[in-house]
């Protein structure tokens, strides 16, 4: 066995030349391999490895969000997203309903949360975050379906919003400052209890699960189809979009995207849409940019929606 002392490696013209020549060829081959790898990686990304616009939109569908686990910022489980409360008149999602689970044979308890308090910006799959610690979550307002009409009452609305407006981690506020902070979630938050009045009719608040599946009638009182889903933006920066599945006009099996506020709830418990088959036929495709750059009070254009 050959052994060499430190600093006394074999030298010589033949060994040195061979070694240098070999190292140059090795470096050249390595550089060529790295270049080839980067080129292939870029081509793969351009050919569809990046998420498509429709896939991003699909992540905002209520059917995708429901059932997700809800955690606080410390990773403690708070519950599961069960449903949303939507305001048909304002065309927005107002509240999220969080299920605390339940034992076999028992109805799960629900907590009500202003929808904007939920966040999709988490590193965990199928998980939403809520900036309310678990020890405080126990005192969060509860919800039953029979309480839906009460949410139109300013006192109840303020009770819900003020609980979350005072979540630890936010600037401490009192008096008028607290009401101003709550008003970001409630249009009646700035008014005093003595002068406040309801700004929406009782029937305008609906559970999203109750609206999904409802029949949509045209302005000519013809059946267009049904609501199959919603696109929701939990930051409230973009309008809530209803997905309309058409089963008759103009072609069966097509879907369209339209602002929720364009739908009107009728006495017959159906939805009315002021449009006709010809207008639907002219609808342009709906994509991520159309929704991303649309403000919460943007126009009421109808788009053709295709989820692949």
Image (cartoon, rainbow, N blue to C red):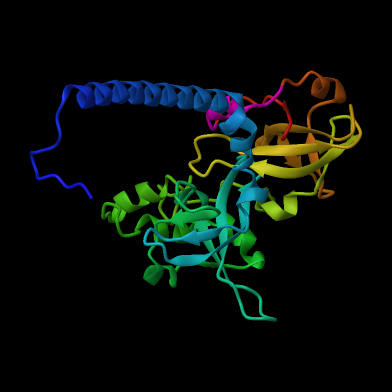
- Residue at the (59%, 72%) spot, across then down: 101
| In the image, residue 53 above or below residue 4 | above
* Magenta stretch: includes residue 251: no
Percent x, y for residue 148? 63, 60
On the rendered structure, is 270 left or right of 165? right
- Residue at the (56%, 49%) spot, across then down: 94
Q: Nearer the viewer, residue 286 or 195?
A: 286
Q: Nearer the viewer, residue 257 or 218?
A: 257
Q: Is residue 156 visible?
A: no
Percent x, y for residue 229? 71, 44
Give the residue at the far front of this rendering. 1
| Quadrant location, the C terminus | top right
Percent x, y for residue 89? 64, 41
On the rendered structure, is 5 left or right of 118? left
* Magenta stretch: includes residue 289: yes
Q: Quadrant of residue 302?
A: top right
Percent x, y for residue 171? 26, 52
- Residue at the (48%, 41%) spot, across then down: 235
Q: Quadrant of residue 228?
A: top right
| In the image, residue 41 above or below residue 129 | above
Q: Which residues are magenta?
A: 285-296
């Amino acid at each position: 066995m050959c052994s060499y002392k430190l600093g006394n490696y074999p030298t010589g013209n033949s060994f040195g030349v061979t070694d240098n020549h070999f190292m140059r060829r090795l470096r050249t081959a390595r550089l060529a391999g790295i270049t080839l790898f980067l080129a292939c990686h870029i081509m793969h990304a351009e050919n569809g490895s990046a998420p498509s616009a429709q896939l991003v939109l699909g992540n905002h569908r209520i059917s995708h969000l429901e059932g997700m686990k809800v955690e606080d910022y410390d990773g403690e489980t708070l519950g599961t997203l069960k449903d949303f409360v939507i305001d048909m008149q304002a065309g927005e999602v107002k509240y999220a309903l969080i299920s605390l689970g339940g034992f076999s044979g028992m109805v799960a308890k629900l907590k009500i949360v202003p929808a904007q308090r939920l966040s999709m910006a988490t590193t965990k799959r199928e998980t939403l975050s809520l900036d309310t610690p678990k020890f405080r979550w126990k005192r969060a307002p509860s919800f039953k379906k029979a309480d839906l009409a009460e949410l139109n009452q300013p006192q109840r609305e303020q009770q819900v919003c003020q609980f979350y407006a005072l979540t630890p981690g936010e600037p401490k506020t009192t008096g008028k400052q607290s009401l101003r902070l709550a008003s970001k979630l409630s249009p009646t938050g700035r008014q005093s209890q003595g002068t406040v009045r309801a700004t929406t009719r009782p029937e305008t608040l609906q559970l999203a699960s109750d609206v999904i599946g409802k029949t949509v009638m045209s302005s000519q009182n013809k059946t267009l189809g049904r609501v199959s889903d919603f696109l929701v933006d939990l930051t409230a920066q973009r309008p809530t979009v209803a997905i309309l599945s058409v089963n008759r006009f103009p072609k069966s099996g097509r879907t369209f995207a339209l602002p929720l506020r364009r739908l009107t709830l009728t006495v017959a418990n159906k939805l009315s849409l002021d449009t006709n088959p010809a207008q639907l036929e002219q609808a342009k495709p709906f994509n991520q940019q159309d929704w991303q750059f649309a403000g919460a009070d943007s126009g009421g254009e109808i788009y053709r929606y295709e989820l692949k």
